[in-house]
Image (cartoon, helix red, strand yellow):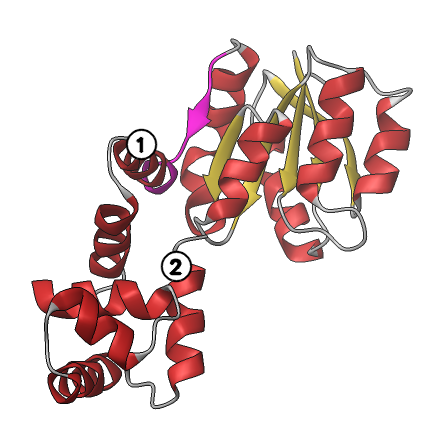
Amino acid sequence: MIHVLIVENQRLLRDGIEAIIERTDDIKVIGAVDNGETAIKQMEHLKADIVIMDIQLPQMDGIRTTKLIKEKYPEVSVILLTSKVNDLVISGINAGADGFLVKALYAERLLEAIRIAYRGETVLSGEVARMLAGRIRELTMNNKQIFTLRLERLGYSFTKREIDIAFLLKENHTNQQIANKLFLGEGTVKNYISEIYNKLNIRNRAKVIDFFVNIMR
């Protein structure tokens, strides 16, 4: 029998997970709590094999809770539920998580994920696997190539020259500095920047720079 502890602050989702598990003969819910602190306390007397936990919890989040659980109970597998595939997944991996499920698809993959994690294998939904593959691909790229790829992933289509200028904008260069680096006239640079603003639908230079900085985080 696989023993599962659920850590989810949304009652509807918590009950949904429990209902799916109750239909099986080989998996049993031995606890269901709504926060990380209670989960840590429950782990002291519950013999859980698997912890299914929301990556975003009030007070102590799922990443911090995962780290504490794995430090004290390394044999326990932790599967994190996430609504968005973003850098929190990387943080979860660093904390020791054994798998990730996207909330929108959890009902289809939940039981399979529990059984896979119980065997000591890593659980990744397709979307998470694609994101991680992209990050691995980025390890072979320079910063400008990564910058270009991330803009493309967000659906932006920039010309090579616009990428050149956007990358220098991200570094907080002035129009004159950009012109000097790219051997362009300052007026030409201004025209390119206007086109970049149009494509991003942002009119404020500081906000554009913030946007470019954030996509590299």
Q: Give the amino acid type for the residue marked by disc 1 in the picture.
A: Leu
The answer to whether residue 41 is visible is yes
Q: Nearer the viewer, residue 210 or 22?
A: 210
Q: Position of residue 126 (x, y in %)?
A: 32, 37
Q: Going by the image, does 128 lie left or right of 5?
A: left
Q: Nearer the viewer, residue 47 or 76?
A: 76
Q: Which residue is mark 2?
A: 215
Above or below — where is 184 with respect to 12?
below
Q: Position of residue 195 (x, y in %)?
A: 16, 84
Quadrant where the N terminus is found in the figure: top right
Q: Secondary structure at mark 1?
A: loop
Question: In the visual, does 147 lie left or right of 208?
Answer: left
Dot 1: within a 10 Å radius of its alpha carbon, few (fewer than 14), some, or many (20 or more) residues? few
The residue that appears at 41% across and 39% down in the rendered structure is 108
Give the numbered dot on residue 139: 1
Quarter-wise, where is residue 102 in the image?
A: top left
Callout 2: helix, strand or loop?
helix
Residue depicted at x 84% and y 24%:
43
Relative vertical location of residue 27 with respect to residue 148 in this rendering, above or below: above
The answer to whether one can see residue 156 in this image is no
Q: Please provide percent x and percent y for residue 36.
A: 79, 41
Q: Amino acid at mark 2?
A: Ile
Left or right: 190 as drawn, with respect to 66: left
* Range of residues picked out in magenta: 121-128
Q: Residue at x 76, y 55 (%)?
A: 58
Percent position (x, y) of residue 71?
Answer: 76, 19
Q: Is tag 1's residue or tag 2's residue first in the polypeptide sequence?
A: 1
Left or right side of 174 for 106: right
